[in-house]
Image (spheres, grey):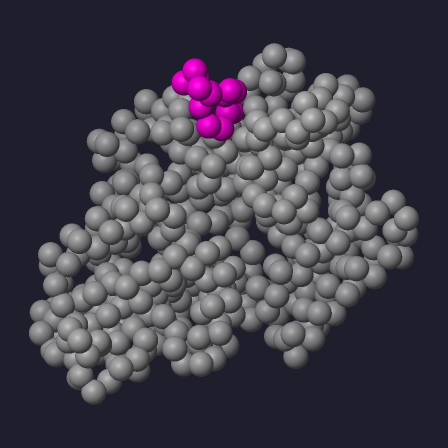
Amino acid sequence: MKKLFILVFTVICSLSLVFLGGCKKDDGKTHVTFYHTMGANLQTVLNKYIGKFNEVYPDIVIDHEAIGSYDDVRDQVITQLQAGTQPTLAYCYPDHVAAYLRSKKVVDLNTYINDPEVGLTTAQIDDFIEGYYAEGHQFGDDTKMYSLPFSKSTEVMYYNKTFFEEHEIAIPTHWFATGETDTTSMEYVIEQIKTIDPNCVPLGYDSEANWFITMTEQLNTPYTAAVTDVSGRFLFNDTRNIAFLKAFKTWHEEGWLTTQAVYGGYTSGLFTNLKEVDGKVLRSYISIGSSAGATYQCPAKLTSGEYPFEVGIAPIPQADTNNQKVISQGPSITMLKQRDEAVNDAAWLFVKFLLTNVNFQAEFSMASGYVPVLKSTFEVDAYESFLAEAGYTKETIAALSAKVCMEQENNYFTSPAFVGSTDARDQVGQLVISVITAGKTATDADILDLFQDAVDKCVTLNQ
């Protein structure tokens, strides 16, 4: 792997090769392409540390590009893998990596991690939060490492704290009411909110797929299985899953909830909306979304300089308080094979530089609300102060979100990642939309057909 080259980086790339992620004819440097989803605030942090990286490795250029959403990155990478023009590095979720593995172009990072010269030390590996690091092994062969954690998040519940306190509404802790006086159920709370403000849609949930998958974990009902037989991989056509989606269908018909696809945009926009139309404001009072999107859940200040309402942040509701589950999200990073191994070697240097750097992890978290993946980050003075002094402002809401994210750490889960798992995620996300918008005339048989069609599509795509 040209380890001497990696250590001193003195090999000059051949100017006769021109390909994505390789050397450029015009500057003779090694170019590493990196696809991600970062907004401007996070790219500011990234660019700062690329500059620091280039102080050590001036002949490596990191060409990074924000593609859009995580699924947009996935779709573009898959397209480029088919054309042989894939980037060197990409943000990823486990099911995305499982899809990339079909191409046989995903680099086993253990090749680098275990190298005695440029790999990770035992101390560096031990510094990763164990559950985050373990995600890279979950692809059917635990001797392979196909991703490393970049930064992590989970879903949290944002709520209009001002409104809740004014009307003495309890913060919901579980989904379904166990009786008429179950004031801490989401079912009770959103009905109460709708009564107070008939023009509102009380609850917005950003990710339909997350909602379905999380419910199956909380209820301990079938979703998928990483088995050899394709017909046995997709298990979500289950009566218990049909039951909770039928309940959410009723909620939608009552005007109690919406989702990103149904609303037509991130539900944070509904949560923070202040605009009147015909003297009415269409808004929500609860928004469930990523802990890393906290700044988007904060309303703009009024002309007086004050916030129109205070945002509270709490763990998501549970279906079973004895089996608490919340999805582990946030990007990992995967490496894709290039025609010139030197490009992958250069990419490894960059990955190692960022992911073992506690200062980068701290600054990235402070700018985003993502949780650092290194334990030692929590001992950085600036990060300790960031968490300790967090109050409610646009600038500190990320810290509040990170705190709640960490409170749920023991409840994290990830779904099995295998060839076809990304198809399952897509199909159950669409299933949520199809069922809750099916209308009051939809029969049980119609809903059963929607579930079976979703399973059939998964099987067909993977035969």
Q: Main secondary structure of the magenta part?
A: loop
Q: Is 304 contained in the magenta span?
A: yes
Q: Residue at x 52, y 59 (%)?
A: 71
| Residue 137: x %, y % from top left | 43, 63
Q: Residue at x 73, y 65 (%)?
A: 455
Is 457 on the left or on the right of 411, as rendered?
A: right
- Asked if one can make out residue 262 in the rendered structure from this viewpoint, the answer is yes
Is 272 on the left or on the right of 129, as rendered?
A: right
Q: Quadrant of residue 375?
A: top left
Q: Which residues are magenta?
A: 299-312
- Asked if one can make out residue 173 in the rendered structure from this viewpoint, the answer is no
Residue 76 drawn above or below residue 125 = below
Residue 52 drawn above or below residue 313 = below
Residue 413 drawn above or below residue 19 = above
| Residue 303: x %, y % from top left | 44, 19
Q: Is 101 contained in the magenta span?
A: no
Q: Quadrant of residue 229?
A: bottom right
Question: Which is more toward the observer, 171 or 230?
Answer: 171
